[in-house]
Amino acid sequence: MRSLLVVIIAYLIGSIPFGYLIVRAKEGGDIRDTGSGGTGATNVSRRAGKAAGVVTLLLDALKGLAAVAIAKVLVGLPVFAGSGSANPPLNALSANTRGGPGLIGGSGSTEQDIYWWVAAAAIAVILGHIFPVWLRFRGGKGVATGVGVFLMLAPIAVALAAFVFLAIVILTRYVSLGSILSAVAIPVFVFLQHEVIRPVEPLAPIMTAAIAGAALIVFAHRQNIGRLVRGNESKFK
């Protein structure tokens, strides 16, 4: 039961509706009645201006960062280990995960076992953003929160995916298309990094989180995909 606390905390962090609160405070309305109906930065910028959109973007990304960081602390892992950069190998983390101060680490746990709970927290915070309990499960698209998550878990993949996002938006002016393709690109880049650049440790939990996160973001964009197919999706100005 205690291990579920990691996931519950991550979900509750993700469900904080910053975009909704910012628009409510500035405009007095419900951001979900505007544009795409999401609570994310793009929709907020359409309703309350670009400054409000930037603040929303940063706060939503911070949710992802915070949820993963808190999950690592709770399970007894170093906050910046396993982030896809120059980290120590799994067996170098043993002192932090076997019998350490976390809720889950113990003599019967391996490092990869514990990282599955971090991966679960990563998925939960994105779920919380898309389906926030406070807004009757109608939230944002999960993109900025996903960026925060994978800045902690796989920053090189996020940097590469950012180039995909910028290229698509510059070429097409569709933020939704850039978001979808960059989200799908993250698990691809995680795998390529592992094979070509340097090992991503532990690969299985991080790859699972990346695939699940991409699937959730694509699902959240299902109406955008329909508008893209019909040719009536709004372009970024």
Image: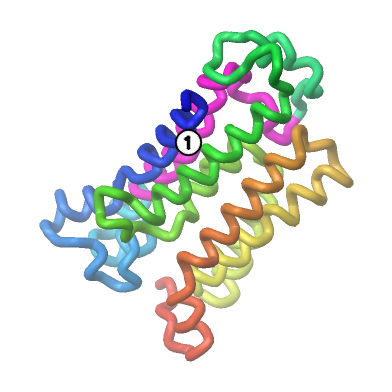
Q: In this view of the protein, which residue sits in the foreground, 237 or 181?
A: 181
Residue at image position (30%, 66%) is 46
| Magenta stretch encompasses residue 59 | yes
Tell me where residue 69 appears, x and y as whole percent: 52, 28
- Which quadrant holds residue 35? bottom left
- As drawn, is 102 to the left or to the right of 38? right
Closer-to-camera residue (106/125): 106
Between 179 and 76, the one lying in front of the other is 76
Q: Which residue is mark 1?
A: 7
Q: Is residue 108 on the magenta stretch?
A: no
Q: Report x, y in % for residue 201.
A: 77, 33
**Dominant SS in magenta:** helix
Location of residue 54 in the rendering, given as x and y in whole percent from the top left corner:
37, 50
Q: Which residues are magenta?
A: 56-85
Q: What residue do we see at 15% from left, 49% from top?
A: 25
Q: Identify whether 118 is placed above or below 176.
A: above
